[in-house]
């Protein structure tokens, strides 16, 4: 079967920062803010967003002048041998079975799910930190509590990596890599059923840069394509979060248009010794 492409048209990020001032988004606008604030945090943020930007080298110079440097790996010399990693002679010990995975996966799609399984699956679906916290509060002795607490801990650590930068804002959220769909993402069941269509999706960007709460604003007409679109977006999209006028990380929204297109029918094979258009 021919390769299937999901044609994407990615629209602009829209930061919901509650102000009439247009949030800085472009290379030049963010650099102007960084120069105005002239702090390590501002230049680091510019560098993280525009490592190949117009002012990337200037940002590194200013960081150095402020007594802070970002290590940049030098390019490998021509003909350099590849890195060799130690050979692992013994296989890693098997992971113990995850009781939470057993609980959620054992729930039949037709049978009613347990309250705990439903609550945890909902948190996994939305990826909202608030839903994981609600789950821990609702099921303090639940099987999936360690999993939820682990996710909460990681999200708290991630949020702490985006401290406020006084005066550095408002700033629109910036995604880390925009082309998130691959040729292998077309759901097999949709492919064989001939399902295709255009989808508009919208989602929240949390203060830690994690995508949450994806919703379909224009459906393809096929549930499998809609659900696959949101699942891929929430799993792969990562951001440098938006900031308000005080430089504090804040929630925002982003959106995307995804056009799932079936491959064209392959041309019929020519008969041996018959030229196109011949008799």
Image (tube, rainbow, N blue to C red):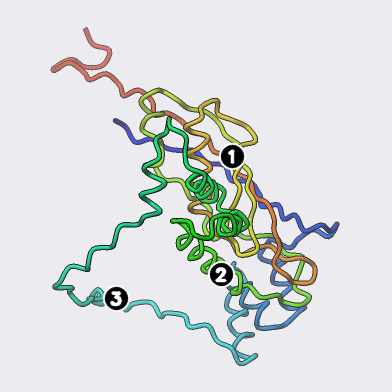
Where, by quadrant of the figure, is residue 214 drawn? Answer: top right
Of marks 3 and 2, the one in the foreground: 2
* Residue 78, numbered circle: 3
Dot 1 or dot 3: first in sequence order is 3
Label 1 belongs to which residue? 257
| Residue 136 position in % (x across, y down) | 55, 59
Q: Is residue 228 above or below residue 49?
A: above
Q: Secondary structure at mark 1?
A: strand
Where, by quadrant of the figure, is residue 166 drawn? Answer: bottom right
Q: Give the Cα separation between the discs numbered 1 and 3.
A: 41 Å
Dot 3 or dot 2: first in sequence order is 3
Q: Secondary structure at mark 2?
A: helix
How crowded pointer 2 is (Cα within 10 Å; few <14, some 14-19, many 20+) is rated as some
Q: Secondary structure at mark 3?
A: loop
Q: Give the Cα separation between the discs numbered 2 and 1.
A: 28 Å
Circles 1 and 3, Cβ within 8 Å, touching? The answer is: no
Which residue in the rendered view is the most extreme toward the right? Answer: 20
Q: Where's the C terminus, which quadrant?
A: top left
How crowded pointer 3 is (Cα within 10 Å; few <14, some 14-19, many 20+) is rated as few
Q: Image check: 235 left or right of 54? A: left
Q: Is residue 167 above or below residue 194?
A: below
Which residue in the rendered view is the most extreme toward the front? Answer: 141
Dot 2 or dot 1: first in sequence order is 2
| Residue 204 position in % (x across, y down) | 64, 51
* Residue 158, numbered circle: 2
Tell me the residue at 75%/79% (across/down): 37
């Amino acid at each position: 079967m021919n390769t299937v492409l999901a044609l994407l048209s990615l629209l602009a990020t829209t930061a919901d920062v509650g102000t009439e001032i247009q949030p800085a988004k472009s290379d030049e606008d963010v650099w102007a803010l960084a120069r105005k604030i002239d702090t390590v945090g501002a230049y680091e943020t510019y560098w993280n967003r525009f490592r190949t930007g117009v002012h990337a080298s200037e940002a590194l110079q200013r960081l150095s002048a402020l007594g802070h440097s970002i290590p940049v790996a030098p390019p490998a010399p021509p003909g350099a041998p590849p890195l060799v990693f130690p050979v692992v002679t013994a296989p890693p010990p098997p992971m113990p079975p995850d009781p939470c995975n057993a609980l959620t996966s054992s729930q039949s799609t037709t049978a009613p799910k347990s309250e705990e399984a439903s609550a945890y699956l909902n948190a996994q679906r939305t990826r909202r930190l608030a839903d994981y916290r609600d789950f821990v509060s609702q099921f303090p002795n639940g099987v999936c509590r360690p999993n939820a607490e682990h996710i909460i801990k990681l999200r708290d650590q991630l949020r702490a990596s985006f401290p406020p930068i006084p005066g550095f804002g408002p700033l629109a959220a910036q995604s880390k890599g925009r082309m998130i769909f691959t040729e292998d993402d077309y759901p097999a069941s949709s492919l064989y059923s001939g399902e295709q269509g255009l989808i508009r999706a919208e989602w929240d960007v949390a203060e830690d840069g994690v995508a949450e709460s994806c919703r379909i604003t224009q459906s393809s007409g096929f549930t499998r394509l809609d659900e696959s679109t949101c699942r891929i977006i929430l799993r792969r999209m990562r951001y440098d979060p938006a900031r308000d006028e005080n430089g504090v990380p804040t929630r925002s929204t982003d959106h995307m248009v995804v056009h799932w297109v079936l491959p064209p029918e392959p041309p019929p094979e020519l008969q041996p010794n018959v030229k196109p258009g011949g008799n």
